[in-house]
Image (tube, rainbow, N blue to C red):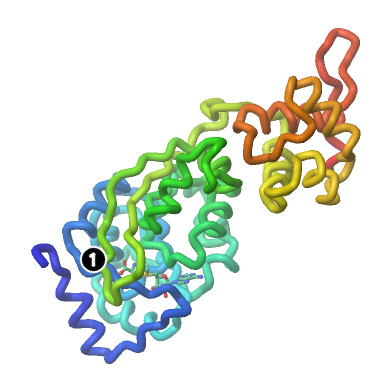
Amino acid sequence: MAGTNTTTIELLKKYDFPIQKKYGQNFLIDDNILNGIVNAAEVSEGDTVLEIGPGLGALTGALCRAASGGRVIAVEVDKMLIPILNETLQDYDNLTIINQDILKVDIGSLLQEGEKNIKVVANLPYYITTPVIMELLEHQSRIRSITVMIQKEVAERMQEGPGSKSYGALSLAVQFYSKPEYLMTVSRNCFLPRPEVDSAVIRLDIYNEEERPVQPRDPEQMFRIIRAAFNQRRKTLMNALSNAGLTGISKENVAEALQNMGISETVRGEALTLAQFAELSDRLLTPCADADGGFSDNKSLFR
Ligand code: SAM
């Protein structure tokens, strides 16, 4: 293969490395794709980069060079990889390697005071793609962009709207918090071991709050509603929401809100757009309209 990364293959042999399927270890062995990811992430001097799952360090060294003067924090769950990373990347003094599960670590605690505009870069293991991206988006205030290689179908799902089978909480979170850009499709042949599906690189550019496509008054409340709607996606929205145990939400007030929005009571959540979820959230947050037609602030209901 033209762009084969011999270093990764040599390292696997040299350390007789026991590849762990449970950690989604499919190592990238194509230099062209590797450089493509670093370029797509637009990492430049002085940046702070968070890499999830450095593996044998194929991307990590390139990120350390691109971010010189800044720093790279690489979080790897597999303790067997830590001595290999320490040895092969010992020349980079701007690298911090952390042996942790990214889903269990408080990302804020990895950052230094004042560090913001973080660029997250990862060849993500398939099994944690959705929870990692949801987590990053919901704590996105210090993040500038997220450039990830993920399963091709998941990258496509991120851009879906109502009417598609794969439209869901992930699509809505991605589209609310960021502008997604699908950058390239990557063949399964670029990995060792070879996975069963193709991958894609996607970059999510995080919006400033005022740039978001909709402005619900309480985004967390909107996502509680979205999650409840898609957790029981075969139920009507009214049943899914009233069964979810959300404070202050009953069949009656969901029915009333939907009626006021001109939407049938029998609608399922998967038929609603992001703008409709935002409106529904605001209406449920403030069931009583003020005399002037505005809505009174009833946020405490959901705290
Ligand atoms: N970055 C390397 C590359 O491109 O060749 C490895 C990518 S491999 C698809 C995913 C990496 O994530 C593996 O090194 C794996 O051990 C690591 N990993 C899996 N689950 C993780 C978790 N929960 N937290 C941190 N790292 C994890």
Residue 215 picture location, percent across and down: 63, 27
Residue at 27% x, 56% y is 186
Q: Is residue 275 left or right of residue 174?
A: right
- State the image coordinates of residue 259 (x, y, percent, origin top left): 80, 23
Number of on-image labels = 1
Q: Quadrant of ligand 1?
A: bottom left
Residue at the far left: name it: 2
Question: Could one spot residue 124 in this view of the protein?
Answer: yes
Residue 179 in the image: above or below residue 198: above
Q: Which residue is denoted by mark 1 in the rendering?
A: 190
Please name the residue shown 27% across and 91% down the image: 16
Identify the image quadrant of the N terminus: bottom left
Q: Secondary structure at mark 1?
A: helix
Residue at 38% from the left image edge and 59% from the top image edge: 122
239 versus 217 height, above or below: below
Q: Nearer the viewer, residue 184 or 44?
A: 184
Report which quarter residue 199 is drawn in: bottom left
Could you tell me the amino acid type at mark 1? Answer: Cys
Going by the image, does 23 lie left or right of 26?
right
Q: Image check: 32 left or right of 106?
A: left
In the picture shown, does residue 16 fall above or below 79?
Answer: below
Q: Nearer the viewer, residue 107 or 236?
A: 236
Rendered location of residue 22, percent (x, y): 47, 79
Q: Residues within 10 Å of mark 1 (few under 14, many from 20)?
A: many
